[in-house]
Amino acid sequence: MGLFDFIKKQFIDIIQWVEAEPGILAYRFPMEDQEIQNGAQLVVRESQKAMFVNEGKVADIFEPGTHTLTTRTLPVLTYLNNWDKLFESPFKSDVYFFSLREQIDQKWGTPEPITIRDKEFGVIRLRGNGIYSYRLSDLERFWKNISGTTELYRASDLEGQLRSIVLTSISSFLGQSNVPFIDMAANQSAFSAGLKAAAAEEFSKLGLELMSCFVQSLSLPEELQAHLDRASSMRMVGDLNKYAQFQTADAIAAAAANPGGVAGAGASLGAGIAMGQMMMNTMSPTSNASNTAPGGGDDPFVALERLGELLKKGVLTQAEFDSKKAELLGKIR
C-alpha cells in the first residue's frame, strides 16, 4: 500500500453501541473498509458485552467499561496473528455488541389443547397461557448457534423457537404432575417453578438463561367446564335451608334493582320465598306434615309481626296484609 493510499484509509478510534430500540440481542458494528486504530477506545455500557471476531473465530470478549485497544489489551488477537509488542499499525476485526438486558413479558399460550390423564375426570384437554423472561448468558454459544454474522438480531427473531420450548416443556410437565385439575389453581406457583426447571436446560443450549416462567391460567374445554359449574351448583344447594335463604336474598336484590322499587317487585320476592319453601317442603316430608297438621306451623302472633314488617317495607300491599291478617286471626279463635 502506497503512502497516499494509507493516508486515505479511514480509521476507527471509538467503537460503541447505543441501544436505540428495545428488543435487540446482538448488533454488528459497521466496519466496511474501515480499520481499527491501534489505541482506539472501546466503550461497553452496563447491560452490554462486546466480542471481537477475527478471521471467523471468537477472539476476545469485553466486559462493561472503556477499553483502550492495544496489543496489551488484545492478548488473544495478538496470539492469533502473531503480533509482537511493538505492533503499531491499524487492524481489522468484526466487533459484535450483545445486550444483557432481561427480555421480559415474553408471552406463551397453547395453540391447541394439551391432552392429559386426570385422576378425577380421566382424559381431559387443557389450555394454558403465561409469560417468561430470559437474558443472554453465553455469548460465544449464542453467536455460533443463533445470531451469527447478522447485522441485527432481535428478540422477535427468536420468539417462535423459545415459545415452542416452553410449550413442549409444559406438555411434559403437566403429563407427569399427577395433580387433579381442580387442585391446579392452588398449585400454580409450584407449576411455574416446575415449568421453569423443565425449560431451563433447552434455553441454556442456545446460550440463554431462563430468568422466570409463569403459568397465569389453565382452563378446560367449555363443555367440561359447564359440567363442573353444574356440579358446583348442586353442592351449593345441598343445604335446602341455605338454598331458601339464597332464593330470598336473590329476590330482594332483584327488587332493589327494579324500576318500581321494592314495592313494585313484591311478587318477585314472594316467588323466591315460595320456591325455596316449596323445595324444602318437597324434600322434607316430616316438616311438611307438621306444618299442615292442626295447630302446626308458626306462632300466629310472630307471623303477624313479620307481615307488619313486610307491610312497612312496601313488600306487601295493605290489601294483602289485611287478607293474611284475617286468616291468622281466624286460627287464634
Image (cartoon, grey):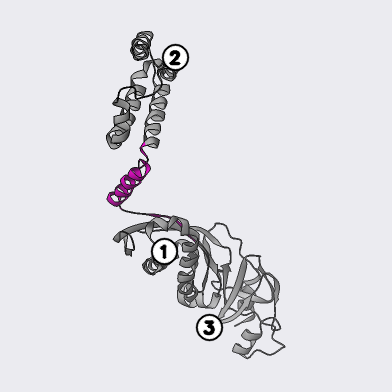
- Tell me if residue 176 comes above or below residue 77 in the rendering: above
Real-space Cα distance between discs 2 and 3? 99 Å
- Tell me if residue 6 comes above or below residue 296 in the rendering: below
Q: Mark 3 or 1 closer to N-term? A: 3
The tag on residue 163 is: 1
Task: Say which element carries label 1.
Answer: helix
Q: Residue at x 71, y 88 (%)?
A: 85
Q: What x and y, as percent, mark residue 326?
A: 35, 10
The one of 100 and 305 positioned closer to us in this rendering: 305
Task: Say which element carries label 3.
Answer: loop
The one of 304 and 54 positioned closer to us in this rendering: 304
Q: Are marks 2 and 3 in contact (CB under 8 Å)?
A: no
Q: Mark 2 or 3 closer to N-term? A: 3
For mark 2, what is the residue?
Answer: 308
Q: Residue at x 58, y 63 (%)?
A: 101
Q: Residue at x 39, y 28 (%)?
A: 248
Q: What x and y, as percent, mark residue 282?
A: 27, 34
Q: For residue 61: magenta? A: no
Say what amino acid the circle numbered 3 marks: Glu
Q: Is residue 197 left or right of residue 127?
A: right
Q: What x and y, as percent, mark residue 321?
A: 38, 12
Mark 1 burial class by Cα count in 10 Å: few <14, some 14-19, many 20+: some
Q: Mark 1 or 2 closer to N-term? A: 1
Say what amino acid the circle numbered 2 marks: Gly
Real-space Cα distance between discs 1 and 2? 67 Å
In the picture, the quarter occupied by the N terminus is bottom right
Say what amino acid the circle numbered 1 marks: Arg
Q: Residue at x 29, y 37 (%)?
A: 283
Mark 3 burial class by Cα count in 10 Å: few <14, some 14-19, many 20+: few
- The range drawn in magenta is 214-240
Q: For residue 220: magenta? A: yes
